[in-house]
Image (cartoon, helix red, strand yellow):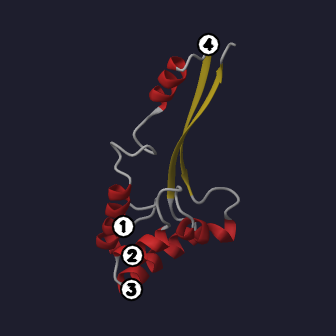
Amino acid sequence: MFLGCDVYAVEDLAEKVKAFYHRAQPRDSDPMHDFDERDLLRLAEEGGFAEVHLDFEAVVARGNPPGWGEKAWDILAKAAPNPLVPSLEEVAERELSPEGAERLLGHLKPLVEAGRRTRRQASAYLRAVKLL
């Protein structure tokens, strides 16, 4: 699986792109990945907040997010997942041969456009009150 899509037919190419993202943002040390909801609570409490609330939401859903419509592929392929890494298209062009990039992106595009993917997302919403 890659981006929630079955990539068995292009697994070798998807693994090269995944490897780039793992090198660019190691899960155990990158500031975008090296914390969880418990760390957020602890940091807020240590920061002197008197009252801390955290809502955690995990979603597993089939298809694209509501509102993506015809833009689904452009959003997924051309937008960077966060400010610290390049977009999927940029990584494919950088890490793969021109033929490999065309093959991987050509495999993913119709799946994304048809909503044939599974999204997994977790969000933590932190609210805190600091007494003066």
The residue tagged with tag 1: helix, strand or loop? Answer: helix
Is residue 28 positioned above or below 12 on the image? above
Q: CA distance from mark 1 to mark 2?
A: 9 Å
Q: Which numbered disc, 1 or 3, marks the residue that appears first in the sequence?
A: 1
Q: Residues within 10 Å of mark 3 (few under 14, many from 20)?
A: few
Q: Which kind of residue does numbered mark 1 sit on?
A: Val
Q: Using a 10 Å C-alpha cutoff, classify the residue at mark 1 as few (fewer than 14 neighbours), some (14 to 19) or many (20 or more).
A: many
User: Disc 1 to disc 3, how far (Cα)?
Assistant: 13 Å
Which of the labelled discs sits on residue 50, or is there none?
4
The Cα–Cα distance between marks 1 and 4, rounded to whole angstroms, is 44 Å
* Label drawn at residue 98: 3
Residue 132's place in the image compared with 110, above or below, is above
Corner quadrant of residue 33: top left
Crowding at label 4, few (<14), some or many (≥20) Cα neighbours within 10 Å? Answer: few
Which of the two labelled residues, at mark 4 and mark 2, occupies the earlier sequence position? 4
Looking at the rendered structure, the kind of residue marked 3 is Pro
Relative height, residue 13 to residue 99 (above, below): above
Q: Residue at x 68, y 66 (%)?
A: 69
Label 2 SS = helix
In the rendered image, which residue does mark 2 sit on?
Answer: 94
Q: Position of residue 105 (x, y in %)?
A: 46, 76
Which image quadrant for residue 123?
top right
Q: Quadrant of residue 17?
A: bottom left
Residue type for callout 4: Ala
| Residue ID at (47%, 68%) | 88
Query: Who's the residue at 69% across and 13% down the image?
Result: 132
Residue plotted at (52% across, 53% down): 119
